[in-house]
Image: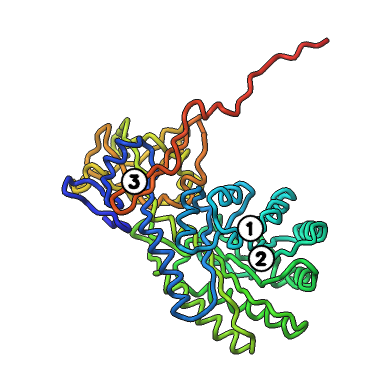
Amino acid sequence: MHLYGTQKINAQGHLEIGGTDAVELAKTYGTPLFVYDIALFRERAQAFQKTFEEAGIGYQVAYASKAFSSIAIYQVAAEENLSLDVVSGGELYTALKAGFPKEKIHFHGNNKSLEELEMAFEEGIGCIVVDNFHEIGQLKKISKDRKQPMNILLRVTPGIEAHTHDYITTGQEDSKFGFDLNNGQADDAFGQTHEHKYLKLLGLHCHIGSQIFDTAAFRMAAEKLIGKMSAWHGETGYLCPVLNLGGGFGIRYTAEDEPLEPSVYVKGMIETVKETAAAAVFPLPEIWIEPGRSLVGDAGTTLYTVGSMKEVPGTRKYAAVDGGMSDNIRPALYGAKYSSLVANKAEAALTEHYTIAGKCCESGDKLIEDAELPPLEAGDILSVFCTGAYGYSMASNYNRLARPAVVFVEDGGHQLVVKRETLEDLIGQDMSYRKQVKS
């Protein structure tokens, strides 16, 4: 069994995370429970930054917080000197409440509302990543009315399709995101923004996919974007000082996955940007990246309590847990795979195979197919690894299930950072019906 970060098996034969017994965490906080290994988050953040610093190149590493957004994780990101990507007014509001440095916040999204953009100006955030011509019009009006400058990046689709799942591939030409680099849209966007009185164009941004395990696609994207920025410089004299190559760095969910170390991704980007810029006689830009999953994905583990079990003779054994697609939609949504361990029987022989079913009223609510585990009993604590990205952030109240609690563990301590929802929380926004009486 592959263990992640600070995970180990302790003297009691239990899974331990961050120096804390997972079984005790389940007893203390209940299940389902998201447990984040903060030491691993810090390690990854430092590894990305160290590679840039050793290369002596300007950079920003922004946590792509759609992976997991909360006040506490934003505060840890700030401690690690990260920048921050937000994609909604809600994420921006959370960042502000966390006290995150406003000048290091980047606002993404393909359909930002007028109210969200005005909020970004009011708070004086660091950068807006512009996605479409409608947004350019809104930004021009807001900045002119307020007489307030705003840094922007133009998000482009470079026509590069990373080898990943169709649902999470975004750099190809047929995408809802960004200005197409090949059909003239990016040139039009540049023409509308580079000489604007208040909009300061920093450069280009792209995101070519997620769960990427090599550097080739990033290299191709860097070459295309540097080429375009160089062409604009030659045509107009305008110099874009920033190249944002996005995120998408893969993690190890199962033994089938073979991700690279953060330094390998970054070194490949730096080498390509240096070579391409030198060949184009273009000043070396700052390189910005946006890791999300690779910071929090394998730092997160979900703990469940095993309940009912069922055997279909000659077919399979089911073991149901007290969560499911309501706290992890990814297996049902696009077949995501996970590995698991029985936290209270971590050293037991793996003699059985189970399909781990959730408790939602859906046949497709299965977290893991054919999990190799010891014989299970009701009350066992099942740990599912690498749920830190897009688990809690995509959780729902389907079937009126309350969303789980979130706990951070580090150096033998544990801290509740998101409370478990209560039944009262579930009806907190409901209104009673009153039959209308015709007068």
* Residue hosting label 1: 108
Q: Nearer the viewer, residue 211 or 4?
A: 4
Tag 3 secondary structure: strand
Q: Give amino acid for label 3.
A: His
Image quadrant holding the C terminus, namely top right
Give the quarter of the image for residue 107: bottom right
Residue 155 numbered mark, or none: 2
**Earlier sequence position, callout 2 versus callout 1:** 1
Q: Residues within 10 Å of mark 1 (few under 14, many from 20)?
A: some
* x, y percent for residue 119: 69, 51
Q: Is residue 79 left or right of residue 88?
A: left
Per the model, the C-alpha gap separating discs 1 and 3 is 32 Å
- The answer to whether residue 370 shows anywhere in this view is no
Image x and y of residue 56, in percent: 49, 81
Amino acid type shown at disc 1: His
Left or right position of 237 against 267:
right
Callout 3–callout 2 Cβ contact below 8 Å: no
Q: Residue at x 76, y 68 (%)?
A: 189
Q: Residue at x 61, y 46 (%)?
A: 90
Specify whether residue 93 is in view.
yes
Q: State the separation of the CA atoms marked 3 and 2.
A: 39 Å
Q: Which residue is mark 3?
A: 414
Camera-side mark, 1 or 3 = 3
Whichever of callouts 3 and 2 sits on the residue coming sooner in the sequence is: 2
| Dot 2 amino acid type | Arg
Does residue 263 appear left or right of residue 1 in this picture? Answer: right
Q: CA distance from mark 2 to mark 1?
A: 9 Å
- Element type at mark 1: loop
Label 2 neighbourhood size at 10 Å, few (<14), some (14-19), many (20+)? many
**Is label 2 in contact with label 1 (beta carbons under 8 Å)?**
yes
- For image coordinates 66% across by 18% down, the residue present is 433
